[in-house]
Protein backbone atom coordinates (compact mmCIF):
# COMPACT_ATOMS: atom_id res chain seq x y z
CA UNK A 1 0.00 0.00 0.00
CA UNK A 2 1.55 3.29 -1.09
CA UNK A 3 -0.75 6.00 0.16
CA UNK A 4 -1.07 6.28 3.91
CA UNK A 5 -1.87 8.74 6.62
CA UNK A 6 0.64 11.51 7.32
CA UNK A 7 3.48 10.97 9.79
CA UNK A 8 1.91 13.34 12.30
CA UNK A 9 -0.71 10.64 12.96
CA UNK A 10 1.87 8.04 13.91
CA UNK A 11 1.00 8.39 17.61
CA UNK A 12 -2.50 7.26 16.68
CA UNK A 13 -1.21 4.00 15.21
CA UNK A 14 0.46 3.15 18.51
CA UNK A 15 -2.61 4.18 20.43
CA UNK A 16 -4.82 1.89 18.34
CA UNK A 17 -2.54 -1.10 18.79
CA UNK A 18 -1.93 -0.50 22.49
CA UNK A 19 -5.12 -2.12 23.90
CA UNK A 20 -4.44 -5.42 22.11
CA UNK A 21 -0.80 -5.37 23.22
CA UNK A 22 -1.71 -4.66 26.84
CA UNK A 23 -4.15 -7.58 26.92
CA UNK A 24 -1.72 -9.93 25.18
CA UNK A 25 1.23 -9.15 27.42
CA UNK A 26 -0.73 -9.09 30.69
CA UNK A 27 -2.96 -12.12 30.26
CA UNK A 28 -1.10 -14.27 27.77
CA UNK A 29 2.63 -13.66 27.55
CA UNK A 30 3.39 -12.81 31.16
CA UNK A 31 1.45 -15.80 32.57
CA UNK A 32 3.09 -18.11 30.03
CA UNK A 33 6.55 -17.02 31.17
CA UNK A 34 5.33 -17.46 34.72
CA UNK A 35 4.33 -21.06 33.83
CA UNK A 36 7.91 -21.68 32.76
CA UNK A 37 9.22 -20.16 36.00
CA UNK A 38 6.83 -22.15 38.22
CA UNK A 39 7.73 -25.39 36.48
CA UNK A 40 11.09 -25.28 38.29
CA UNK A 41 9.47 -25.17 41.73
CA UNK A 42 7.63 -27.55 43.99
CA UNK A 43 4.87 -26.28 46.26
CA UNK A 44 4.78 -27.40 49.87
CA UNK A 45 1.74 -29.51 50.88
CA UNK A 46 -0.25 -26.45 51.94
CA UNK A 47 0.84 -24.49 48.91
CA UNK A 48 2.21 -21.63 50.96
CA UNK A 49 5.84 -22.02 49.97
CA UNK A 50 7.71 -22.74 46.72
CA UNK A 51 10.93 -24.74 46.75
CA UNK A 52 13.31 -24.57 43.79
CA UNK A 53 13.81 -28.07 42.41
CA UNK A 54 15.41 -27.47 39.00
CA UNK A 55 14.15 -29.85 36.33
CA UNK A 56 12.81 -32.38 38.82
CA UNK A 57 9.18 -31.84 37.76
CA UNK A 58 10.05 -32.63 34.16
CA UNK A 59 12.07 -35.69 35.17
CA UNK A 60 9.19 -37.00 37.23
CA UNK A 61 6.68 -36.34 34.45
CA UNK A 62 8.70 -37.98 31.73
CA UNK A 63 9.39 -41.05 33.83
CA UNK A 64 5.79 -41.34 35.02
CA UNK A 65 3.79 -44.13 33.33
CA UNK A 66 0.59 -42.22 34.22
CA UNK A 67 1.76 -39.20 32.26
CA UNK A 68 2.84 -41.25 29.25
CA UNK A 69 -0.54 -42.95 29.35
CA UNK A 70 -2.16 -39.55 29.34
CA UNK A 71 0.00 -38.25 26.51
CA UNK A 72 -0.40 -41.29 24.25
CA UNK A 73 -4.13 -41.43 24.78
CA UNK A 74 -4.49 -37.73 23.95
CA UNK A 75 -2.49 -38.07 20.75
CA UNK A 76 -4.30 -41.21 19.58
CA UNK A 77 -7.65 -39.72 20.50
CA UNK A 78 -6.87 -36.47 18.66
CA UNK A 79 -5.59 -38.21 15.53
CA UNK A 80 -8.66 -40.45 15.21
CA UNK A 81 -11.14 -37.66 15.94
CA UNK A 82 -9.55 -35.24 13.49
CA UNK A 83 -9.45 -37.88 10.77
CA UNK A 84 -13.10 -38.88 11.24
CA UNK A 85 -14.49 -35.34 11.44
CA UNK A 86 -12.51 -33.91 8.52
CA UNK A 87 -13.07 -36.80 6.13
CA UNK A 88 -16.80 -37.07 6.82
CA UNK A 89 -17.25 -33.27 6.60
CA UNK A 90 -15.42 -33.27 3.26
CA UNK A 91 -17.55 -36.07 1.79
CA UNK A 92 -20.77 -34.38 2.93
CA UNK A 93 -19.66 -30.98 1.64
CA UNK A 94 -18.82 -32.37 -1.81
CA UNK A 95 -22.15 -34.16 -2.04
CA UNK A 96 -24.28 -31.23 -0.85
CA UNK A 97 -22.39 -28.96 -3.24
CA UNK A 98 -23.94 -30.77 -6.23
CA UNK A 99 -26.88 -29.11 -7.92
CA UNK A 100 -29.72 -30.82 -6.10
CA UNK A 101 -33.03 -29.72 -4.73
CA UNK A 102 -33.06 -28.82 -1.04
CA UNK A 103 -29.27 -28.43 -0.81
CA UNK A 104 -29.74 -25.45 1.50
CA UNK A 105 -31.85 -27.43 3.96
CA UNK A 106 -29.38 -30.30 3.97
CA UNK A 107 -26.57 -27.85 4.64
CA UNK A 108 -28.33 -26.18 7.57
CA UNK A 109 -29.14 -29.53 9.16
CA UNK A 110 -25.56 -30.70 8.89
CA UNK A 111 -24.02 -27.62 10.48
CA UNK A 112 -25.97 -27.30 13.70
CA UNK A 113 -23.85 -29.48 16.02
CA UNK A 114 -21.44 -26.54 15.73
CA UNK A 115 -23.63 -24.58 18.17
CA UNK A 116 -23.16 -27.23 20.89
CA UNK A 117 -20.26 -27.08 23.32
CA UNK A 118 -17.99 -30.08 23.85
CA UNK A 119 -19.59 -30.48 27.28
CA UNK A 120 -23.10 -30.53 25.78
CA UNK A 121 -22.00 -32.93 23.05
CA UNK A 122 -20.59 -35.13 25.81
CA UNK A 123 -23.84 -35.14 27.79
CA UNK A 124 -26.00 -35.95 24.76
CA UNK A 125 -23.79 -38.81 23.56
CA UNK A 126 -23.30 -40.03 27.11
CA UNK A 127 -27.05 -40.51 27.46
CA UNK A 128 -27.49 -41.90 23.95
CA UNK A 129 -24.88 -44.55 24.72
CA UNK A 130 -25.69 -44.92 28.41
CA UNK A 131 -25.63 -48.57 29.56
CA UNK A 132 -28.96 -48.22 31.44
CA UNK A 133 -30.96 -45.59 29.63
CA UNK A 134 -29.34 -45.16 26.20
CA UNK A 135 -31.27 -46.14 23.12
CA UNK A 136 -28.14 -46.59 21.01
CA UNK A 137 -26.23 -48.80 23.42
CA UNK A 138 -29.41 -50.85 23.78
CA UNK A 139 -29.62 -51.55 20.05
CA UNK A 140 -25.88 -52.07 19.70
CA UNK A 141 -26.14 -54.79 22.30
CA UNK A 142 -29.27 -56.26 20.71
CA UNK A 143 -27.69 -56.50 17.27
CA UNK A 144 -24.02 -57.20 17.98
CA UNK A 145 -24.21 -58.83 21.44
CA UNK A 146 -21.44 -56.42 22.37
CA UNK A 147 -22.12 -54.57 25.60
CA UNK A 148 -21.17 -50.92 25.18
CA UNK A 149 -20.73 -49.86 28.79
CA UNK A 150 -18.70 -46.66 29.03
CA UNK A 151 -19.15 -46.54 32.79
CA UNK A 152 -17.16 -49.75 33.34
CA UNK A 153 -15.14 -50.19 30.21
CA UNK A 154 -12.19 -47.95 29.40
CA UNK A 155 -12.31 -48.83 25.71
CA UNK A 156 -15.99 -47.91 25.49
CA UNK A 157 -15.38 -44.61 27.29
CA UNK A 158 -12.49 -43.83 24.94
CA UNK A 159 -14.68 -44.56 21.89
CA UNK A 160 -17.46 -42.45 23.38
CA UNK A 161 -15.34 -39.30 23.69
CA UNK A 162 -14.09 -39.83 20.12
CA UNK A 163 -17.68 -40.00 18.83
CA UNK A 164 -18.88 -36.99 20.82
CA UNK A 165 -15.92 -34.81 19.74
CA UNK A 166 -16.09 -35.90 16.10
CA UNK A 167 -19.78 -35.07 16.02
CA UNK A 168 -19.10 -31.62 17.43
CA UNK A 169 -16.25 -30.90 14.98
CA UNK A 170 -18.17 -32.12 11.94
CA UNK A 171 -20.31 -28.98 11.68
CA UNK A 172 -17.31 -26.71 12.06
CA UNK A 173 -15.36 -28.42 9.28
CA UNK A 174 -18.43 -28.63 7.07
CA UNK A 175 -18.82 -24.80 7.10
CA UNK A 176 -15.25 -24.30 5.91
CA UNK A 177 -15.47 -26.93 3.17
CA UNK A 178 -18.75 -25.49 1.89
CA UNK A 179 -17.16 -22.05 1.69
CA UNK A 180 -14.07 -23.45 -0.05
CA UNK A 181 -16.10 -25.41 -2.58
CA UNK A 182 -17.98 -22.28 -3.61
CA UNK A 183 -14.72 -21.07 -5.09
CA UNK A 184 -14.14 -24.15 -7.24
CA UNK A 185 -15.19 -22.99 -10.68
CA UNK A 186 -18.11 -24.96 -12.17
CA UNK A 187 -16.70 -24.41 -15.69
CA UNK A 188 -13.65 -26.44 -14.79
CA UNK A 189 -15.80 -29.35 -13.66
CA UNK A 190 -18.03 -29.08 -16.72
CA UNK A 191 -15.00 -29.16 -18.97
CA UNK A 192 -13.95 -32.35 -17.22
CA UNK A 193 -17.46 -33.71 -17.75
CA UNK A 194 -17.16 -33.15 -21.48
CA UNK A 195 -13.87 -35.02 -21.46
CA UNK A 196 -15.77 -37.86 -19.82
CA UNK A 197 -14.05 -37.76 -16.43
CA UNK A 198 -15.62 -39.90 -13.71
CA UNK A 199 -16.82 -38.25 -10.47
CA UNK A 200 -13.84 -39.72 -8.63
CA UNK A 201 -11.34 -38.43 -11.15
CA UNK A 202 -12.97 -35.01 -11.00
CA UNK A 203 -12.73 -35.00 -7.22
CA UNK A 204 -9.11 -36.15 -6.93
CA UNK A 205 -7.77 -34.24 -9.93
CA UNK A 206 -9.69 -30.96 -9.71
CA UNK A 207 -11.62 -30.37 -6.50
CA UNK A 208 -9.22 -31.81 -3.96
CA UNK A 209 -6.10 -29.94 -5.13
CA UNK A 210 -8.09 -26.70 -5.12
CA UNK A 211 -9.31 -27.14 -1.56
CA UNK A 212 -6.15 -28.66 -0.14
CA UNK A 213 -5.03 -25.38 1.51
CA UNK A 214 -8.25 -25.26 3.53
CA UNK A 215 -7.92 -28.97 4.33
CA UNK A 216 -4.44 -28.37 5.68
CA UNK A 217 -5.65 -25.37 7.68
CA UNK A 218 -8.48 -27.45 9.15
CA UNK A 219 -6.06 -30.23 10.01
CA UNK A 220 -4.03 -27.79 12.11
CA UNK A 221 -7.00 -26.06 13.73
CA UNK A 222 -8.78 -29.34 14.48
CA UNK A 223 -5.70 -30.84 16.04
CA UNK A 224 -5.38 -27.92 18.45
CA UNK A 225 -9.09 -27.65 19.21
CA UNK A 226 -9.67 -31.34 19.79
CA UNK A 227 -6.49 -31.65 21.83
CA UNK A 228 -7.49 -28.82 24.16
CA UNK A 229 -11.29 -28.65 24.20
CA UNK A 230 -12.20 -32.27 24.77
CA UNK A 231 -11.67 -31.39 28.40
CA UNK A 232 -15.38 -30.51 28.52
CA UNK A 233 -16.48 -33.97 27.36
CA UNK A 234 -14.23 -35.71 29.86
CA UNK A 235 -15.19 -33.50 32.79
CA UNK A 236 -18.95 -34.00 32.40
CA UNK A 237 -18.79 -37.71 31.57
CA UNK A 238 -15.86 -39.79 32.76
CA UNK A 239 -13.57 -37.58 34.89
CA UNK A 240 -10.62 -39.37 33.34
CA UNK A 241 -11.87 -42.89 34.08
CA UNK A 242 -12.59 -45.70 34.01
CA UNK A 243 -9.08 -46.83 34.93
CA UNK A 244 -7.51 -43.64 33.46
CA UNK A 245 -8.71 -44.59 29.96
CA UNK A 246 -9.88 -41.03 29.25
CA UNK A 247 -7.32 -39.21 31.39
CA UNK A 248 -6.28 -36.85 28.59
CA UNK A 249 -3.46 -34.34 29.20
CA UNK A 250 -5.69 -31.33 29.80
CA UNK A 251 -7.74 -33.22 32.35
CA UNK A 252 -4.66 -34.46 34.19
CA UNK A 253 -3.28 -30.91 34.18
CA UNK A 254 -6.54 -29.62 35.63
CA UNK A 255 -6.53 -32.24 38.40
CA UNK A 256 -2.93 -31.61 39.37
CA UNK A 257 -3.36 -27.82 39.30
CA UNK A 258 -6.73 -27.35 40.94
CA UNK A 259 -7.57 -30.52 42.86
CA UNK A 260 -4.16 -31.60 44.18
CA UNK A 261 -2.73 -28.04 44.16
CA UNK A 262 0.61 -29.18 42.75
CA UNK A 263 1.22 -25.95 40.88
CA UNK A 264 4.85 -26.65 39.92
CA UNK A 265 4.06 -30.12 38.61
CA UNK A 266 1.06 -28.75 36.69
CA UNK A 267 3.12 -25.90 35.22
CA UNK A 268 5.68 -28.38 33.94
CA UNK A 269 2.79 -30.10 32.13
CA UNK A 270 1.79 -26.72 30.67
CA UNK A 271 5.29 -26.35 29.25
CA UNK A 272 5.13 -29.80 27.65
CA UNK A 273 1.82 -28.80 26.05
CA UNK A 274 3.50 -25.66 24.78
CA UNK A 275 6.10 -27.80 23.03
CA UNK A 276 3.24 -29.63 21.31
CA UNK A 277 1.65 -26.35 20.17
CA UNK A 278 5.03 -25.02 19.02
CA UNK A 279 5.61 -28.10 16.86
CA UNK A 280 2.17 -27.72 15.26
CA UNK A 281 2.79 -24.01 14.66
CA UNK A 282 6.16 -24.66 13.03
CA UNK A 283 4.57 -27.24 10.72
CA UNK A 284 1.91 -24.73 9.85
CA UNK A 285 4.27 -21.87 9.05
CA UNK A 286 6.56 -24.14 7.12
CA UNK A 287 3.84 -25.42 4.82
CA UNK A 288 1.20 -22.72 4.74
CA UNK A 289 2.74 -19.40 5.72
CA UNK A 290 0.48 -16.75 7.11
CA UNK A 291 -3.17 -17.77 6.97
CA UNK A 292 -6.23 -16.55 8.77
CA UNK A 293 -7.15 -18.67 11.73
CA UNK A 294 -10.51 -19.25 13.25
CA UNK A 295 -10.91 -20.55 16.74
CA UNK B 1 -24.58 -32.53 -18.76
CA UNK B 2 -27.61 -34.30 -17.36
CA UNK B 3 -27.23 -36.53 -14.38
CA UNK B 4 -28.90 -39.93 -14.34
CA UNK B 5 -32.08 -40.04 -12.32
CA UNK B 6 -30.86 -42.98 -10.25
CA UNK B 7 -27.77 -41.00 -9.25
CA UNK B 8 -29.93 -38.11 -8.02
CA UNK B 9 -32.06 -40.46 -5.95
CA UNK B 10 -28.93 -42.04 -4.52
CA UNK B 11 -27.55 -38.61 -3.55
CA UNK B 12 -30.77 -37.68 -1.78
CA UNK B 13 -30.87 -40.99 0.02
CA UNK B 14 -27.27 -40.56 1.16
CA UNK B 15 -27.94 -37.03 2.41
CA UNK B 16 -31.15 -37.96 4.20
CA UNK B 17 -29.35 -40.73 6.07
CA UNK B 18 -26.45 -38.40 6.91
CA UNK B 19 -28.73 -35.61 8.13
CA UNK B 20 -30.55 -38.15 10.24
CA UNK B 21 -27.34 -39.47 11.78
CA UNK B 22 -26.08 -35.97 12.55
CA UNK B 23 -29.40 -34.70 13.89
CA UNK B 24 -30.56 -37.82 15.71
CA UNK B 25 -28.64 -37.04 18.94
CA UNK B 26 -30.38 -33.66 19.12
CA UNK B 27 -33.83 -35.11 18.38
CA UNK B 28 -33.17 -37.80 20.96
CA UNK B 29 -32.12 -35.20 23.55
CA UNK B 30 -35.39 -33.40 22.93
CA UNK B 31 -37.40 -36.63 23.26
CA UNK B 32 -35.74 -37.45 26.59
CA UNK B 33 -36.60 -33.94 27.78
CA UNK B 34 -40.32 -34.76 27.45
CA UNK B 35 -40.33 -38.03 29.41
CA UNK B 36 -40.86 -38.60 33.12
CA UNK B 37 -38.20 -40.25 35.27
CA UNK B 38 -39.79 -43.71 35.15
CA UNK B 39 -39.93 -43.59 31.38
CA UNK B 40 -36.28 -42.52 31.21
CA UNK B 41 -35.20 -45.52 33.26
CA UNK B 42 -37.62 -48.00 31.67
CA UNK B 43 -36.24 -51.03 29.85
CA UNK B 44 -36.05 -51.20 26.89
CA UNK B 45 -35.31 -47.49 26.49
CA UNK B 46 -38.10 -45.42 24.99
CA UNK B 47 -37.85 -43.57 21.71
CA UNK B 48 -40.93 -41.39 21.85
CA UNK B 49 -42.29 -38.08 23.02
CA UNK B 50 -43.67 -38.11 26.56
CA UNK B 51 -46.16 -35.74 28.14
CA UNK B 52 -43.95 -34.42 30.91
CA UNK B 53 -42.34 -31.69 28.85
CA UNK B 54 -43.73 -28.63 30.66
CA UNK B 55 -42.83 -30.07 34.05
CA UNK B 56 -39.29 -30.92 33.02
CA UNK B 57 -38.60 -27.51 31.55
CA UNK B 58 -40.06 -25.74 34.59
CA UNK B 59 -38.04 -27.99 36.90
CA UNK B 60 -34.87 -27.43 34.86
CA UNK B 61 -35.42 -23.67 34.84
CA UNK B 62 -35.91 -23.44 38.60
CA UNK B 63 -33.34 -25.98 39.71
CA UNK B 64 -30.52 -24.48 37.66
CA UNK B 65 -31.58 -20.86 38.14
CA UNK B 66 -31.68 -20.75 34.36
CA UNK B 67 -32.67 -17.09 34.02
CA UNK B 68 -29.47 -16.02 35.71
CA UNK B 69 -27.35 -18.53 33.79
CA UNK B 70 -28.72 -17.30 30.46
CA UNK B 71 -28.13 -13.71 31.43
CA UNK B 72 -24.55 -14.35 32.53
CA UNK B 73 -23.63 -16.36 29.44
CA UNK B 74 -25.24 -13.84 27.08
CA UNK B 75 -23.58 -10.95 28.85
CA UNK B 76 -20.04 -12.32 28.76
CA UNK B 77 -20.45 -13.63 25.20
CA UNK B 78 -21.64 -10.29 23.85
CA UNK B 79 -19.11 -8.22 25.79
CA UNK B 80 -16.20 -10.45 24.79
CA UNK B 81 -17.24 -10.65 21.13
CA UNK B 82 -17.70 -6.86 20.90
CA UNK B 83 -14.44 -6.25 22.77
CA UNK B 84 -12.54 -8.50 20.39
CA UNK B 85 -14.08 -6.83 17.36
CA UNK B 86 -13.21 -3.31 18.54
CA UNK B 87 -9.63 -4.19 19.49
CA UNK B 88 -9.04 -6.18 16.30
CA UNK B 89 -10.40 -3.47 14.01
CA UNK B 90 -8.29 -0.78 15.71
CA UNK B 91 -5.08 -2.80 15.55
CA UNK B 92 -5.63 -4.01 11.98
CA UNK B 93 -6.36 -0.44 10.87
CA UNK B 94 -3.12 0.76 12.45
CA UNK B 95 -1.11 -2.03 10.79
CA UNK B 96 -2.44 -1.33 7.29
CA UNK B 97 -2.91 2.44 6.94
CA UNK B 98 0.05 4.08 8.66
CA UNK B 99 2.94 2.80 6.58
CA UNK B 100 6.06 1.63 8.35
CA UNK B 101 6.70 2.73 11.91
CA UNK B 102 9.28 1.61 14.48
CA UNK B 103 8.32 -1.62 16.23
CA UNK B 104 5.53 -2.45 13.79
CA UNK B 105 6.72 -6.00 13.12
CA UNK B 106 7.41 -6.88 16.71
CA UNK B 107 3.98 -5.61 17.78
CA UNK B 108 2.35 -7.68 15.05
CA UNK B 109 4.23 -10.78 16.12
CA UNK B 110 3.24 -10.20 19.75
CA UNK B 111 -0.41 -10.31 18.71
CA UNK B 112 0.08 -13.39 16.52
CA UNK B 113 1.71 -15.21 19.42
CA UNK B 114 -1.69 -15.51 21.13
CA UNK B 115 -2.26 -18.52 18.91
CA UNK B 116 0.57 -20.36 20.52
CA UNK B 117 -0.68 -19.79 24.04
CA UNK B 118 -4.01 -21.55 24.59
CA UNK B 119 -5.34 -21.45 28.13
CA UNK B 120 -3.94 -24.78 29.46
CA UNK B 121 -0.42 -23.49 28.79
CA UNK B 122 -0.82 -20.62 31.26
CA UNK B 123 -3.75 -21.64 33.40
CA UNK B 124 -2.05 -21.73 36.81
CA UNK B 125 -0.41 -18.26 36.60
CA UNK B 126 -3.46 -16.70 34.93
CA UNK B 127 -5.61 -18.04 37.75
CA UNK B 128 -3.16 -16.60 40.30
CA UNK B 129 -3.22 -13.29 38.45
CA UNK B 130 -7.02 -13.20 38.67
CA UNK B 131 -6.71 -13.92 42.37
CA UNK B 132 -4.22 -11.06 42.86
CA UNK B 133 -6.39 -8.64 40.91
CA UNK B 134 -9.42 -9.67 42.96
CA UNK B 135 -11.12 -10.78 39.76
CA UNK B 136 -12.00 -14.35 40.77
CA UNK B 137 -15.72 -14.97 40.63
CA UNK B 138 -16.40 -11.76 38.68
CA UNK B 139 -17.36 -10.89 35.10
CA UNK B 140 -13.91 -9.29 34.66
CA UNK B 141 -12.17 -12.67 34.70
CA UNK B 142 -14.62 -14.04 32.15
CA UNK B 143 -14.27 -11.21 29.64
CA UNK B 144 -11.23 -8.91 29.71
CA UNK B 145 -8.44 -11.53 29.38
CA UNK B 146 -10.06 -12.65 26.10
CA UNK B 147 -10.30 -9.27 24.38
CA UNK B 148 -7.22 -9.72 22.20
CA UNK B 149 -7.67 -11.75 19.06
CA UNK B 150 -5.05 -12.76 16.52
CA UNK B 151 -7.85 -14.21 14.42
CA UNK B 152 -9.65 -10.88 14.36
CA UNK B 153 -6.56 -8.79 13.61
CA UNK B 154 -5.60 -11.10 10.72
CA UNK B 155 -9.15 -11.17 9.41
CA UNK B 156 -9.51 -7.38 9.26
CA UNK B 157 -5.92 -6.80 8.14
CA UNK B 158 -6.38 -9.09 5.16
CA UNK B 159 -9.66 -7.44 4.33
CA UNK B 160 -8.25 -3.89 4.51
CA UNK B 161 -5.42 -4.85 2.19
CA UNK B 162 -7.98 -5.67 -0.51
CA UNK B 163 -9.87 -2.39 -0.13
CA UNK B 164 -9.06 -0.33 -3.27
CA UNK B 165 -6.32 2.18 -2.60
CA UNK B 166 -8.16 4.87 -4.57
CA UNK B 167 -10.61 5.05 -1.69
CA UNK B 168 -7.95 6.32 0.69
CA UNK B 169 -6.38 8.55 -1.95
CA UNK B 170 -9.66 10.29 -2.64
CA UNK B 171 -10.33 10.68 1.07
CA UNK B 172 -6.85 12.07 1.69
CA UNK B 173 -7.44 14.74 -0.94
CA UNK B 174 -10.58 15.68 0.98
CA UNK B 175 -8.36 15.97 4.07
CA UNK B 176 -10.07 13.22 6.04
CA UNK B 177 -8.73 12.29 9.49
CA UNK B 178 -7.79 8.65 10.16
CA UNK B 179 -10.56 8.03 12.68
CA UNK B 180 -13.20 9.47 10.39
CA UNK B 181 -11.94 7.31 7.52
CA UNK B 182 -12.13 4.26 9.77
CA UNK B 183 -15.57 5.06 11.11
CA UNK B 184 -17.45 6.24 8.03
CA UNK B 185 -15.72 4.32 5.24
CA UNK B 186 -13.94 1.20 6.44
CA UNK B 187 -16.30 -0.06 9.11
CA UNK B 188 -19.40 0.02 6.89
CA UNK B 189 -17.41 -1.95 4.31
CA UNK B 190 -16.38 -4.59 6.86
CA UNK B 191 -19.91 -5.48 7.87
CA UNK B 192 -19.84 -9.11 6.79
CA UNK B 193 -16.45 -9.66 8.43
CA UNK B 194 -17.76 -8.14 11.65
CA UNK B 195 -20.80 -10.38 11.57
CA UNK B 196 -18.71 -13.48 10.88
CA UNK B 197 -16.34 -12.70 13.75
CA UNK B 198 -19.22 -11.91 16.11
CA UNK B 199 -20.91 -15.24 15.42
CA UNK B 200 -17.75 -17.27 15.85
CA UNK B 201 -16.74 -15.47 19.04
CA UNK B 202 -20.21 -15.47 20.60
CA UNK B 203 -20.54 -19.22 20.19
CA UNK B 204 -16.94 -19.71 21.30
CA UNK B 205 -17.39 -17.77 24.54
CA UNK B 206 -20.81 -19.27 25.21
CA UNK B 207 -19.31 -22.75 24.98
CA UNK B 208 -16.21 -22.04 27.04
CA UNK B 209 -15.91 -24.51 29.85
CA UNK B 210 -12.52 -24.83 31.56
CA UNK B 211 -12.03 -21.15 32.43
CA UNK B 212 -15.43 -20.53 34.08
CA UNK B 213 -15.01 -23.87 35.84
CA UNK B 214 -11.86 -22.71 37.62
CA UNK B 215 -12.56 -18.98 38.08
CA UNK B 216 -16.23 -18.90 39.09
CA UNK B 217 -17.85 -20.29 42.14
CA UNK B 218 -21.01 -18.41 43.02
CA UNK B 219 -24.38 -18.40 41.27
CA UNK B 220 -23.92 -14.66 40.69
CA UNK B 221 -21.58 -15.16 37.75
CA UNK B 222 -22.21 -18.82 36.91
CA UNK B 223 -22.60 -19.59 33.20
CA UNK B 224 -24.83 -22.07 31.38
CA UNK B 225 -22.12 -24.71 30.79
CA UNK B 226 -21.25 -24.93 34.49
CA UNK B 227 -24.88 -24.70 35.64
CA UNK B 228 -25.69 -27.71 33.50
CA UNK B 229 -22.79 -29.72 34.84
CA UNK B 230 -24.06 -29.05 38.35
CA UNK B 231 -27.38 -30.68 37.51
CA UNK B 232 -25.58 -34.02 37.14
CA UNK B 233 -25.19 -35.53 40.63
CA UNK B 234 -22.12 -37.68 41.17
CA UNK B 235 -23.69 -39.96 43.76
CA UNK B 236 -27.32 -40.40 42.65
CA UNK B 237 -29.16 -41.42 39.50
CA UNK B 238 -29.25 -38.34 37.28
CA UNK B 239 -32.65 -37.11 36.15
CA UNK B 240 -31.71 -37.11 32.49
CA UNK B 241 -35.10 -35.73 31.42
CA UNK B 242 -34.56 -32.55 33.47
CA UNK B 243 -30.90 -32.30 32.42
CA UNK B 244 -31.84 -32.60 28.75
CA UNK B 245 -34.50 -29.92 29.18
CA UNK B 246 -31.85 -27.58 30.60
CA UNK B 247 -29.48 -28.50 27.79
CA UNK B 248 -32.05 -27.69 25.12
CA UNK B 249 -32.73 -24.30 26.72
CA UNK B 250 -28.99 -23.66 27.02
CA UNK B 251 -28.24 -24.27 23.36
CA UNK B 252 -31.02 -22.05 21.99
CA UNK B 253 -29.11 -18.72 22.21
CA UNK B 254 -25.99 -19.85 20.29
CA UNK B 255 -28.24 -21.66 17.83
CA UNK B 256 -30.30 -18.51 17.25
CA UNK B 257 -27.21 -16.35 16.83
CA UNK B 258 -25.88 -18.86 14.38
CA UNK B 259 -29.12 -19.16 12.39
CA UNK B 260 -29.71 -15.43 12.08
CA UNK B 261 -26.15 -14.78 11.05
CA UNK B 262 -25.65 -17.92 8.99
CA UNK B 263 -25.78 -16.25 5.64
CA UNK B 264 -23.22 -13.57 6.31
CA UNK B 265 -21.09 -16.11 8.10
CA UNK B 266 -20.77 -18.26 5.00
CA UNK B 267 -20.19 -15.13 2.92
CA UNK B 268 -17.53 -13.92 5.36
CA UNK B 269 -15.77 -17.27 5.12
CA UNK B 270 -16.11 -17.40 1.36
CA UNK B 271 -14.52 -13.97 1.12
CA UNK B 272 -11.61 -15.15 3.23
CA UNK B 273 -11.02 -17.93 0.76
CA UNK B 274 -10.56 -15.55 -2.14
CA UNK B 275 -7.41 -14.02 -0.81
Image (tube, rainbow, N blue to C red):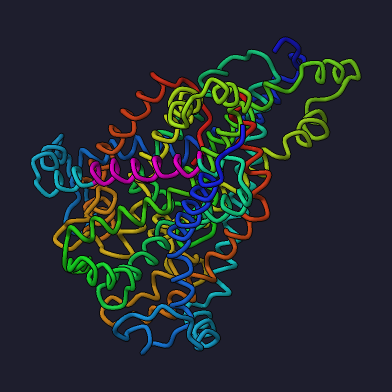
Q: Dominant secondary structure of the magenta stretch?
A: helix
- Left or right position of B40 against B10: left
> Residue shown at 66%/50% (left/top)?
B261
Please identify the quarter of the rendering in which residue A79 is found. top left
- Left or right position of A76 against A10: left
Q: Position of residue A82 (x, y in %)?
A: 35, 42
Please identify the quarter of the rendering in which residue B177 is found. top right
Q: Position of residue A255 (x, y in %)?
A: 25, 57
Q: Tell which of A164 and B205 is nearer to you.
A: A164
Q: Tell which of A34 and B30 is nearer to you.
A: B30
State which quarter of the image contains the N terminus of chain B.
Answer: top right
State which quarter of the image contains the C terminus of chain B.
Answer: top right
Q: Tell which of A55 and B1 is nearer to you.
A: B1
> Residue shown at 67%/14% (left/top)?
B99
- Left or right position of B265 against B245: right
Magenta residues, as a range? A74-94
Q: Position of residue A14 (x, y in %)?
A: 64, 25
Amino acid sequence: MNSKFAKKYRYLAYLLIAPSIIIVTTFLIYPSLQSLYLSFFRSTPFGNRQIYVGIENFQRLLTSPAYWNSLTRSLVFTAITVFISISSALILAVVTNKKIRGAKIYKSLLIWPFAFSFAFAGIIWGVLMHPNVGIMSHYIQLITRFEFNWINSGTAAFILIIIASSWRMLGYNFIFFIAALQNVSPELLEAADIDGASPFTKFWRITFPLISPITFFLLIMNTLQVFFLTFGVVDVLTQGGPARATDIVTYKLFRDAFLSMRTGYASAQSIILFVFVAVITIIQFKYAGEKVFYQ
Amino acid sequence: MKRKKSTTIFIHLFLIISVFLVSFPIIYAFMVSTLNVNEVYSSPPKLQLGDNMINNYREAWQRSNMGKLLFNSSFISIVTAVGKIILSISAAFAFVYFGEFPGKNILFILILITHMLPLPIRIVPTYQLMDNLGWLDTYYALTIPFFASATGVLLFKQFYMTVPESLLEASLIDGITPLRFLWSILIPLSKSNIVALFTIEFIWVWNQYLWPLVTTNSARVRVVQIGLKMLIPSDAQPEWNVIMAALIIGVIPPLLVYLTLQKSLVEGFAMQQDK
